[in-house]
Amino acid sequence: MKSRIIIDSPGIDRILTRMTHEILEVHKGTEKLTLMGIQTRGVNIFVFPNATFS
């Protein structure tokens, strides 16, 4: 089977930027907003600097 690229790095950047804008518009800012995810495989795309979780 021939492999192919479905989405490239700039495409991922555009998607993440648009998702961020949508979230901020819906929630009208970041107060009381928590984003979390479960990594199933691959690598982290973002690590919260100086974050503490409880």
Image (cartoon, rainbow, N blue to C red):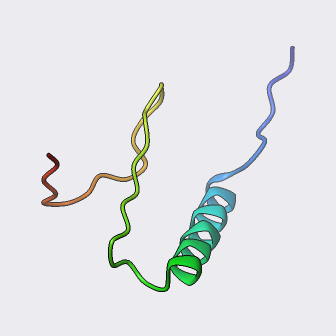
Residue 37 placement (x, y as % from top left): 43, 43
Total numbered labels placed on residues in the image: 0
Q: In which quarter of the view is residue 23 placed? A: bottom right
- Left or right: where does residue 13 sit relative to residue 4? left
Q: In which quarter of the image is residue 22?
A: bottom right
Residue at the location (12% across, 53% down)?
52
Q: Position of residue 2 (x, y in %)?
A: 86, 20
Relative to 40, say whether 8 is above or below.
below
Q: Which residue lies furthest to the top in this view?
A: 1
Q: Nearer the viewer, residue 37 or 16?
A: 37
Q: Where does residue 36 sit, x and y in percent of width and height? A: 39, 49
Q: Which residue lies furthest to the right in this view?
A: 1
Q: Which of 38 and 6 is in front in this view?
A: 38
x and y, in percent, of residue 31 in the image: 33, 78
Image height check: is 38 above or below 52? above
The residue that appears at 61% across and 67% down in the rendered structure is 19
**Left-right relation of 4 to 22:** right
What residue is shown at x 26% (from left), y 57% (from top)?
A: 48
Q: In which quarter of the image is residue 15?
A: bottom right
Q: Residue at x 69, y 60 (%)?
A: 11
Quadrant in which the N terminus is drawn: top right
Frontmost residue, 31 versus 2: 31
